[in-house]
Image (cartoon, helix red, strand yellow):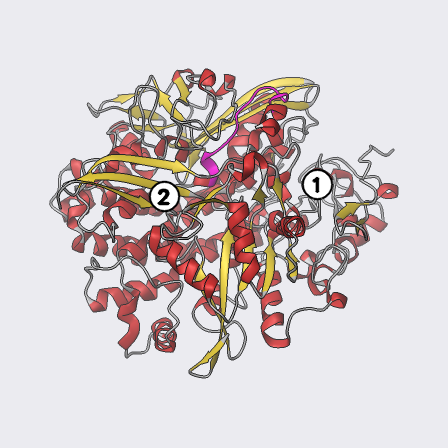
Amino acid sequence: MAGKQTISVDPITRIEGHLKVEVVTDGGEIKEARCSGQLFRGFELMLLNRDPRDATLLSQRVCGVCPVVHATASALCLDAAFGVDGSIPHNARVMRNLILGANFLQSHILHFYHLAALDFVDVAAGADYEGADDRLNSLRDFIKRGELAPFMPRYEGDYRLSKEANQQAASHYVQALEARRTAHEMLSVFGGKMPHQVGIVVGGCTETPTADKIAAFLSRLEVLRRFIGEVYLPDVLTVAESYGDYFEIGTGVRRWLSYGGIELETEETGLLKRHRFFPSGRIAADLKLGPVDASKINEHVLHSWYDDTTTRRHPAESETVPAPEKEAGYSWIKAPRYEGEPYEVGPLARTLVAYVSGDAAVKSDVEGVLSQFNAGPEALFSVLGRHAARALEARRLAKAMADWTMELRPGEPVCEWREPPESGSGMGLTEAPRGSLGHWAEIREQKLTRYQLVVPTTWNASPQDDEGKPGPIEQALIGTRVRDPENPFEVVRIVRSFDPCLACSVHMLTPRGREVARCRVL
Amino acid sequence: MGERAGMMEHPAIWFQGSACSGCAVSVLNGVAPTVRDLIVDQLAPGHHVNLRFQPTIMAASGEVALEVLAAAEEAKEGYLLVVEGALPTAAGGLFGRAARPRTAKKGAHTTMHERALELARNASAIVALGTCAAYGGMHAAEPNPSGCVSISEALREAGIEKPVINVPGCPPHPDWFTGTVAQALLFGLPGPEDLDAAGRPKRFFGRLLHDLCPRRGEFEAHKFAKAAGEPGCLYELGCKGPWTHADCPERQFNGGVNWCVGAGSPCHGCVEPFFPDISCPIYRKIGLQELPRIARDEESGELVAVRRPEQVEEG
């Protein structure tokens, strides 16, 4: 395959939102890659001048796949702005963790089976199934009727599992639909409904824990723990056995960041210092652990469709002027950088930070998988490394959630309910299923005068920065060989391993309402 | 529509505009019917929805996906178009970019707004799924930076006449969607008598949440919660039940596990036109004398709020 060739994958389906990826290959190897967010909404602007408490509900509408974490970040941010961050009731801390944890489990299961698996699993192998599995009989009848959407057409030529393994994975695809639904049912025990739960508010939670609710939650959690341990994790390993080269494909920037998240019992109020289930930290290419200092983050826009004068600002001082026809722009996503460097966020980043921090459970999980494949730590920095990190994280989290549920104390308070303060400001940093999430808010005269978000996919799917350094997904693509440009499996497998959420990643950030007028003129 | 092995196949296209995917995720939460019934088995006896294009779950990506969409669009038998999300119109629609196949006569580059209208032209009927598709919703919230409009508004401006059924909610209950589609498959499209002024099936949106609420007795007895976590009616915490049309109290969410008021949270009125602006501040008590009424302006055909709620503190 000689010469340069451009491969455009637009849309990347089976992700949240609207993403286009374009790569240029030379002799079959990717030399350039461009990740392009296709939608601009202006969410932060829509939160301005509202009652700050509305933000915990409305900011969830940024993303219907993981709304909970926006409510969480928003609540953390506004708890501080309202001055109640030191007095969140015990029950509220636990319920917030259970609501968020339930959505992590839902999101990870959904990601592997319903977003990523069809790149590895051939569901057509169910066509001649003969057996007693009700799900496979149903799938066979579906295939026989001959209308194969939405499972066909698809990229062809690189499905490597055996017929039996494909059939089993196809059956698990259907079972996983039930598992992820169960996770949402579990979530709504304390969250009221899902998507867009209503239980998390500034100051605490609205639901009151009772023995029947604790039992209703735990019963579903047990179903999920079995599913994760007996189905999800083994399926990830089955895929890994047949696609071993994907332990080497999709390395990326070799820099990982985690703000840390999920609040454990602690006296410390500083979000980056306190005791959390996911530790905070930053790992650079030398694999040494460093601290996270939120003031060192800024956002570049030279290659985004925003005015160049607004580049390299800290999120809390950011201003965004859309420039939808800018020549050098190719994405609605900005390029956040930490001390000028791109960082990968997400389950792999969290796992590595916890591993290097000396977390025994994480060490044992990671080493278990690596020894099974006779691989060194380098194998983690890959497409399969990300899938494995996600599944192992789900298993650890589900186990911890069972203990947290038993910490609930029926009859005790759930909320420190307050009217909005005259003025205040706050920062909410936490971890979403897809990685590090930050909300920043400022209140004047009891209204929001500034609201900003920097979300996981802004880090991962960022375009080139002002120095021309590609973002993490772009770097993970560069250097990869694409075997068949008409069926670019490598591209979509790499992109989906990051679990991109585009709805989250495209925002307008502005401290001043008057920018609205400029938007309308454009 | 065609019959295969005794099953009526109903082609459908699911288009996402300016959305959060929450509507799609909510449909995955269906209990009866389930999403497996919807995609694989049958939605109603003998009727299968042939979901040819659904970006959140479909196997195809890129050009393969675009060709599927183009082929579905040209199919003579027509299709049900499900629209999720609002349509950005500011900056010539560039805030929401979309693509056609590279061989398309009109060129590959387009916008969500333009593409939605193209797909609407050949559709036999349209389901506007979720409050954004039905009325603009969160994506059109003040100051509506991307100029988002509902599919009905986009059609009206383009002069395209198609039957549109609004199935709002942020997110919509899965039953509201599958029930509406099942109605169409089994008994045909709803007539004007089946829909309310805001274009919603009366079956699900015909009654006030306040009238169905299990805490109605506490409202009548003036037993009000004054802070989150307290027992009692949530009216003082800003509940929008008195002007919200939905059967949430009876149906409940996530397989009947819970719902907003059940979890101690006031109803936000998420199924109503002008949500979220009409509901904000969400935790501020509404004045019962100032309930908004949504009506359709007979001349322009647009939805209007006859009176916006003056959300003043009372007493």
The residue carrying mark 2 is A499
The residue carrying mark 1 is B230
Instruction: Name the chain letter of the residue that bears numbered label 1.
Output: B
Residue A353 in which image quadrant: top left
Do the dots labelled 2 and 1 sit on one chain? no
| Foreground of the two, A12 or A259 | A12
Left or right, residue A428 beside residue A105:
right
Q: Tell me how far mark 2 sits from mark 1, CA to CA.
A: 39 Å
x, y (%) of residue A326? 44, 27
> What kind of element bears circle 2?
loop
x, y (%) of residue B85? 56, 48
Viewport quadrant of the C terminus of chain B = top right
| Residue A86 is at least partly visible in this image | no
- Which of discs 2 and 1 lies nearer the camera? The answer is 2
| Foreground of the two, B146 or A358 | B146
Q: Which residues are magenta?
A: A503-515
x, y (%) of residue B117? 56, 52
Name the kind of residue labelled 1 in the image.
Glu
Name the kind of residue labelled 2 in the image.
Asp
| Residue B197 is at least partly visible in this image | yes
